Image (tube, rainbow, N blue to C red):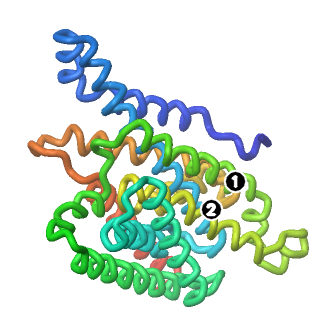
Amino acid sequence: MSGDARIPLPLLAGAALLFLLSLALPWTSLDALFARDPSLGWAVLVQLRLPRAVLALVYGATLGASGAAAQALFANPLASPDLTGTTSGAALGAVVTAYLLALTSPLALALGAVAGAFGALFLLLALAGPRAETATLLLAGLAISALAGALTTLALALAPSPFAFYDAYEWLMGSLVDRSLAQAAFAAVPAFAVVLLLARLRPALDSLTLGEEVAEAFGHDIARLRLWIVCLTALGVGACVAICGAIGFVGLVAPIFARRLTRGHPGRAVLPAALIGGALLLAADLVTRLAPLGRTLPIGVVTALLGAPFFLSLVVGMRWRLGR
């Protein structure tokens, strides 16, 4: 890997520390289990906390890398899987697969979620175009998210099970609780491949900052690049949504911080954005676990509470820079 695409060591160390904290905290409960029954303590560590930490890192990395690629493709800092409707489309595909088609295997759910993410991304490209302005991108993304949300609610209302809404609520808000190592591995394999493949698109993504004509003059096939980004984003986000539900704003925040580390180069920001996304989701999961509320919050609620003010500050900052 070339030096300009290298991940800063402090960033790597911070993500590793958060991963270890995710395994260890809250220490009082884990320490009590080890003191009373070491075998039970190891079981809790390996079977409950390890899958949760792995999924947080994997899902966050996928959202971060996908957001960095989307922002480069659309030349827009507000492009992210949740704001472009990708996450909502993936959730719709998974809900239709589980509650209308009654296919609940991990593979079936993943295929349904990937199909929904594909549909949302292709619809966005059709509505907004590949180099959408901010207002057009936001309007198209909001329209797709609203449509996917309405269709998700309709699918749950039409489901044969009268408890479909209750069963799907926590999952739709995003949850890492009670996931297995097998599920973590199922999400990690495609996510790892997606992050690496998106990182390999670095030269083409960087050339897009000069415009599509210049990028094509450098020998990059823009139509193929667009297809690669759509397919990889749909695959990575769909696989994670099928396991953990919809989690927003990580794919928006992580690439913006990553570009500051890479001096604004979108292609070089893919790997740092993946690591920042994983760290953000690990930190959010620690908040859900340690918040003194008497119960665990859905992780999607925490990321929304943290990400929504950041998103609003971006919109206000863009208006201020444009003098409006």
Mark 2 residue type = Leu
Q: Are marks 1 and 2 in contact (CB under 8 Å)?
A: yes
- Can the viewer see residue 314? no
Does 323 sit above or below residue 245?
below
Where does residue 283 sit, x and y in percent of width and height? 36, 42
Calculate the distance from the C-alpha at mark 1 to the C-alpha at mark 2: 8 Å
In the drawing, does residue 49 fall left or right of residue 197? Answer: left
Where does residue 76 sit, x and y in percent of width and height? 58, 74
| Callout 2 secondary element | helix
Where does residue 152 sit, x and y in percent of width and height? 32, 76
Where does label 1 land, which residue? 197
Does 252 sit above or below residue 291?
below
Q: Quadrant of the N terminus?
A: top right
Residue visible at 78% across and 67% down in the picture:
207
Where does label 2 land, which residue? 232
Residue visible at 52% across and 44% down in the picture:
188
Q: Quadrant of residue 156?
A: bottom left
| Callout 1 secondary element | helix
Is disc 1 surrounded by few (<14), some (14 to 19) or many (20+) residues within 10 Å?
A: some
Residue visible at 62% across and 51% down in the picture:
195
Does 133 sit above or below residue 55?
below
Q: Quadrant of the C terminus?
A: bottom left
User: How many numbered marks appear?
Assistant: 2
- Can the viewer see residue 154? yes
Q: Quadrant of residue 109?
A: bottom left
Q: Earlier in the sequence, mark 1 or mark 2?
A: 1
